[in-house]
Amino acid sequence: MVSPIPPSSASATARSNAPLFTIPDVVIRLAGNSQDGIQAVGGFLARLAGRSAQEVMTYMTIPSTISGGPSIFQVRIGSGEILSAGDRADVLVAFYQHSYESHRSSLRPGGVLLYDSDHVTPNPDDKEITAVGIPMTSATVEAVGGSSKEKGKNIYVLGLLARMFDLDVPKLSQLIKERFGGKNEDIVRNALLAFDAGYAYPAENLAHILFRLETPTPTVGGRPQITTDGNTALTYGLIAAGVRHGAGYPITPWSSIMETLRTELPKYGGIFVQCEDEIAAASTALGFSYGGNLSITGSSGPGLSLKMEALGWATMAELPLIVVNVQRGGPSTGMPTNIEQSDLLQAIYGSHGDCPRVVLAPKNVEDCFYIAIEACRIAREFSTPVIILTDQALATRIEAFDEPDLPKLMIEQKPDLSPRDASYKPYPLDQVQRHAPPGSVIGSGKYPTVTGLEHDEYGHPTASPAMHTKMTIKRREKIKSVAATFPAPELFGDQSGDVLLIGWGCTYGPIREALGRLRGAGATVGHIQIRHIHPLDGGLEEIFARYRHILVVEINDEGLYGYGQLATLLRSRYCNPAISSITKTDGLTYKVSEIVERVAIKLGLADTTVGMRKQSLLASALTAQK
Amino acid sequence: MSAPTLSPAVSSAPEAPRAPLTKKVLVADHPTWCPGCGDFAVLASFYKVLEKLNYPQEKIVTFAGIGCSSRFPYFVNTHGGHYIHGRSLPFAAGISLGRDDLHVFVFGGDGDGFSIGGNHLVHTARKNPRMTYVIMDNSVYGLTKKQTSPTSPIGFKSKTDPWGAFDQPINPMRTLINSGATFIARSHATQVNHMVEMMHRAALHDGFSVVEILSECVEFFEGAFDSSIPRKGGSFQTIDLKKNDGSAEDAARHDPTDELAALRLALDPWPGKFGIYYENKSRPTKNALEQKLITNTREKTKNASDLELLSKTFARMR
Ligand SMILES: Cc1ncc(C[n+]2csc(CCOP(=O)(O)OP(=O)(O)O)c2C)c(N)n1
Ligand code: SF4
Ligand SMILES: [Mg+2]
C-alpha cells in the first residue's frame, strides 16, 4: 500500500505562521445531497472529538427518498459540556447552490461559509459573513484521479476542516483507515489522497480563518470516550442486559436497531427474526419470552399501533417483553424522517381494555444504553411489557460519552427451567407472576395455561366479576409498584422559584442550555427530564409545589384542550393548574433560543433581555480579525 | 462464555425413569364444546398421538389462537396457552426457534388460520420452523355464532350472508402447497384412526407440518361434511401413497414429494381426498438454519465470550 506523506509535517510551517484563535466550541454544518457522504465527514469529526475526550453532539437530516435529495449533518465539538447540536452554525460548508441557499440562514453573523466554487455562487453583497470559495470538486478530481468522479469530495472537505481547526491529523488518518480498511486498498489510498489535498489547500487563502479548539483538561483515570448514535447505544444496551432474542419489521427510523440485532445476536448465540409484519413480530417476540428468554420487538409509530393487540395480551398473560418505539412525525406515514414526540399517549394508553404498562424515555444518546438495561430489569422483575420511547433525533445523532463499565453491567440470561413445587400458581394474586417456561416440571402435575382470557390464579378462564376485579387491581398495582424502584429524579438549576421546565426524550440538551441562559438573565429556573413516563417518577408533586410555573416542553401538538401529551398526563395526575405546555410540530428538534423565547413569552418577559444574543468566542475571534 | 441459547442452560428435573404418557395424565379441563362438536374427536385423537409420541410431558407445548377450536389447550395437560385471534403461528415460531428442545403444537379454526391469520400461515410455511399446526375446519365461524368463514362454500347461508355466501372460498390444500409448507395433510374428524395417523406423521416431520381436519360444527353448519361421511351416504376417499414397488398399480399412486401432483390432487372436486398431499424432507428448518448461522458466526469470532464481544464492539467506537 502506498503510504501517504504525513501532511501535518509537510504543512506545519505554513500553519504556524497564521494567527491562531483558541475557541471553546464550534458548530459546523455540512450541507449537500444524501449521496455526498457528508454523514461520513460528520461522523469522522464526531469520533475524532470522542477520541480527544472532547464533547460532541450531532444533528442530521436524511431525506426519505432513496437516493439524492438534500441532506445535512451538523456537528458541534467543544471542550465544555455540549448539550445541543447548536442553534446556529459557526461554519457552513455548502456543496451546491441549493445547499447554500437553504442553509445560509443557519449561519450566524460573523460565521464562515466554505463553498464549493465549482457549484456555488454566493451573494456578493452578503457582508455579514466571511465567504471562502474553494474548488472542492475539481480539486478532489485532480487529487484522486478522474475516474472517481466526485467521490471523495467529502474527505477533501474533512482535510480542509482539519487544517482550519488544527485537528489531530494522525488520529483522523487512522479513523479513515479504520473506516475504509475493510474495502480494497485503492479506496483507502484515494481517501487519504483526498484528505491530504484538502489539508494542503494553500494556507494563504485560509489564513484569516484558522482556529484552534481548546483542549479539554484531561480527566485523570477517566474511562475512554466512545462515539455513537442513539439507536446503536440502545441496541448494545439490550445486548448488555442479556437480550438474545427478538423480532421486527423494517420501518424508519427503527430499522437500524433490527439490522444490528440481526447481525449481532448470532454472535451471542441468539436469533433475531424478520417477520412479515409488526403483529407477527410482537407475537414472535412474545413466543421467545414465553420460552423463557426476555426478548425485544420494536418499530416506529404506525408499527407500534399494529402491535397493540399483542401488547394487550402480554399485559393479561403477564409476560415480559421489551418494545422499542422510535418516534417520528405522524399520524400515518406522516414525516417519517423527522422528529416528533407524539406517541406518548399511544405508548401508555394505546390499547384495548385496562392495560397498564411501563413506558420509559431516554434523555440522550448515552441514556439510550442505560435505559435499555433498566427496561430489561423492570421487564424481568415485574414480568411485564416495557416500552422504550425514543425518537428520530436520538436515533440518528452522534454523541460522545464514557465507555460503559461492561464487566459490571452485563447480565447473563437463561430460561429458568427449575422444577416448580406443588404450590406453583401461574397468576398468584398476592405476588408478581413468575412464569414457568415450558420445560419446567410442575410439581402438582397440573401444567399452566398462559392466556389472554381473564383467568383465576391457575390460569383457568373465568368470567367471575369478583375475579376480574381482583386481577385488574393486581395488574394495576404491579405496575404502580415499579415506581418504587426508580431513583429520585434529577433536578437541575434552581431548587424552587419562577419556573420548572419539564422535558422528556431528546429535548434534554436544549432545555438544559435554555436553563443556563434563563438563569443568566436573572430568572430562577429548574429543570427535570422525565425518564420514567409510566409510572411517573416519585416525588414530583412535592417538587412541582416549589415553582410558580411548570412548563412542559415537548415536540407534539397541544391537542383539543391546549396541552401537549406529557402535560396532559401530568395535569391529570397532579391536578396542578400551574402546569402548562410549550409545544411545536415542525418536525425539528428545539433550538435553545426557541425554548428561551417561548418561556419568556409565557412568563411575560418577552421584551426583557432574557439574555440570548451572547456571542460565542468564535464570533468575537472573527470580528477581531476583520 | 454463554452457550448458544437455543439449548436451555438450566436443566429440568434430574432424569428419572418416566412413566409412559397416558390419556389420564393428559386430560385437563373438561371441554366446553357443544355436544356432538367434531372437535371432541380431534382432541381424543391428539391424546392418542401424544401417547404414541411419549415425549416428556413438560417438553410439550400446546398453543392456539381464538375460536371454539382454539379452546383446545385448556383441555390438554401440557405447558401451553391461548394467544390472540389469528396470530398463534408467529407466536409459536418464537417458542420453537427460541427453544429447540420443545415439541410445539398449534391448534385453530378456519377463520383463525385462513382469514385473520392468512398472511401468517403463508409466511410461517415459508420459514419452515419446526412445529405442527392442526386446523379444525368447520367452514364457519363457530365462536362468534355463524358468520361466513373463508372456507364456507358458495351458497352457505350465514348471518353475514343470509342469501347464501358468494365469495370464492379458499382451497386450503392449494394455499398450503403454494405457500411452501413442508408437510401437508388432510383428515376428517369422523375418522379417528386416520386423524391419529396424520397428526402422528405430522409431529414426526422435521419442519412446519400442517393437518387440516374437517370438523363439523353441529350448531351452525350441520351436515357440512356429510358428502365425505360414508354412514351419511358420502364417501371417504383416502390418498394411496406410492410404494415404489415397481408394480403397475403403483404408477397410479400419489407421490407426496411431487408438488405438481399434490396441486392436481388439491384441485379435485369437493369433498376431495384425505391423506398426505405433500411432504418435503429436504428443505432445512429455520431452526437448523438459524443454528447454523450461530455456529458459523461464532466460529468467526472464535467463540469469544459475550463480554469479550461487546468490549470489542465498544472499543471500535472509541
Ligand atoms: C382481533 C379479533 N377480531 C375478532 C375476534 C372475534 N372472533 C373470535 S373467534 C372468531 C372466528 C372464529 O372462527 P374460527 O377460527 O373458524 O374458529 P371456530 O370457532 O369456528 O372453531 C372471531 C371473528 C377476536 N377475538 N379478535
Ligand atoms: S359452536 Fe360449533 S364449533 Fe363451536 S363448540 Fe359448538 S359445535 Fe363446536
Ligand atoms: Mg371455524
Image (cartoon, coloured by chain):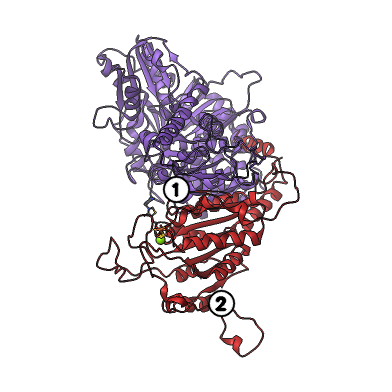
The vertical placement of A398 against B287, above or below, is above
* Local secondary structure at mark 2: loop
Front-most of A234 and A163?
A: A234
Quadrant of the image occupied by residue A71 = top left
Q: Please give the count of numbered marks on the rendered protein.
A: 2
Q: Residues within 10 Å of mark 1 (few under 14, many from 20)?
A: some
Q: Residue at x 45, y 27 (%)?
A: A477
**Label 1 chain ID:** A
The vertical placement of A517 against A128, above or below, is above
A12 relative position to B113: left or right: right
Residue A135 in percent (x, y) is at: 44, 42
Examine the rendering and report whether any part of residue A172 can be seen: yes
Give the amino acid type for the residue marked by disc 2 in the picture.
Asp
Quarter in which the C terminus of chain A is drawn? top left
Q: What residue sits right under mark 1 in the picture?
A: A35
Chain letter, colour red: B
Give the drawing colour for chain A: purple
Q: CA distance from mark 2 to mark 1?
A: 49 Å
Residue B15 in percent (x, y) is at: 75, 47
Quadrant of the image occupied by residue A389 = top left
Residue A221 in percent (x, y) is at: 66, 20
Q: What residue sits right under mark 2 in the picture?
A: B258
**Label 2 chain ID:** B
Front-most of A245 and B267?
A: B267
Q: Quadrant of ligand 1?
A: bottom left
The vertical placement of A154 against B245, above or below, is above
Examine the rendering and report whether any part of residue A146 can be seen: no
Front-most of A310 and A360?
A: A310
Q: Residues within 10 Å of mark 2 (few under 14, many from 20)?
A: few
* Local secondary structure at mark 1: helix
